[in-house]
Image (cartoon, grey):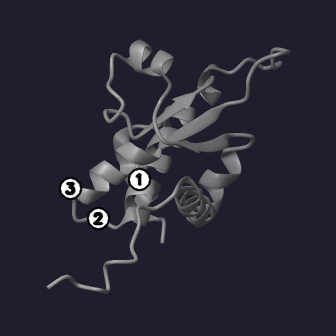
Amino acid sequence: MADHRLSGLSAPTLSDIEELAAEAFRGLPDDFRALCGEVIISVTDFPTEEVQNEMDAGPFDLLGLFQGIGLAHDAAIPETGRMPNMVFLYRRAILDYWAEHEETLGAVVTHVLVHEIGHHFGLSDDDMYGIEDRTP
């Protein structure tokens, strides 16, 4: 017999992941979040074909991606016409990962967000895990 408690469930939407990402960002340590400046967080289902080709990756291979110039490599005077730094979170790959692991969806989104923003600052994996440990 089917479990009727599950019959109304659906996969989290782009908006749901955006809300989790916003909540995760607000929960990051103040000093880390303050350094993020104008980084834009965007949630899409999949990376573009161009990104997949550049990264030699399939649509489910990337959970997220930082695009832009990290602070360590940024010029003292910003270039005109340069696109803003962005973190992309890829919903379908995140959901696929979540379905196969024991972590909560919020924990997965937080991990991907911290990891991709960490690239913005040139942080090591240990540094990023330390930030995650400080995130509620």
Which of the two residues, 7 or 100, is positioned nearer the viewer here? 7
Secondary element type, mark 3: loop
Label 3 amino acid?
Glu
Q: Is residue 58 left or right of residue 33?
A: left
**Residue, x 29% and y 64% (percent of image)?**
103
Distance from the alpha carbon under mark 2 to that under mark 1? 10 Å
Secondary element type, mark 1: helix
Task: In the rendered structure, find residue 103 and report the number of the disc placed on it.
Answer: 2
**The N terminus lies in quadrant:** bottom left
Which of the two residues, 117 or 12, is positioned nearer the viewer here? 12
Which of the two residues, 25 or 126, is positioned nearer the viewer here? 25
Task: In the rendered structure, find residue 100 and report the number of the disc placed on it.
Answer: 3
Label 1 amino acid?
His
Q: Is residue 15 left or right of residue 48?
A: right
Bin the neighbour count of mark 1 within 10 Å (Cα to Cα): few under 14, some 14-19, many 20 and up: some
The reply to whether dot 2 and dot 1 touch (C-beta < 8 Å) is yes
Quadrant of res 37: top right
Task: In the rendered structure, find residue 111 and report the number of the disc placed on it.
Answer: 1
Distance from the alpha carbon under mark 2 to that under mark 3? 9 Å
**Residue, x 44% and y 55% (percent of image)?**
109
Total marks in image: 3
Quadrant of res 22: bottom right
The reply to whether dot 2 and dot 3 touch (C-beta < 8 Å) is no
Label 2 amino acid?
Glu
Image coordinates of residue 44 in percent, x first then y, are: 54, 41
Task: In the rendered structure, find residue 125 and report the number of the disc placed on it.
Answer: none
* Sequence-earlier tag: 2 or 1: 2
Which of the two residues, 5 or 15, is positioned nearer the viewer here? 5
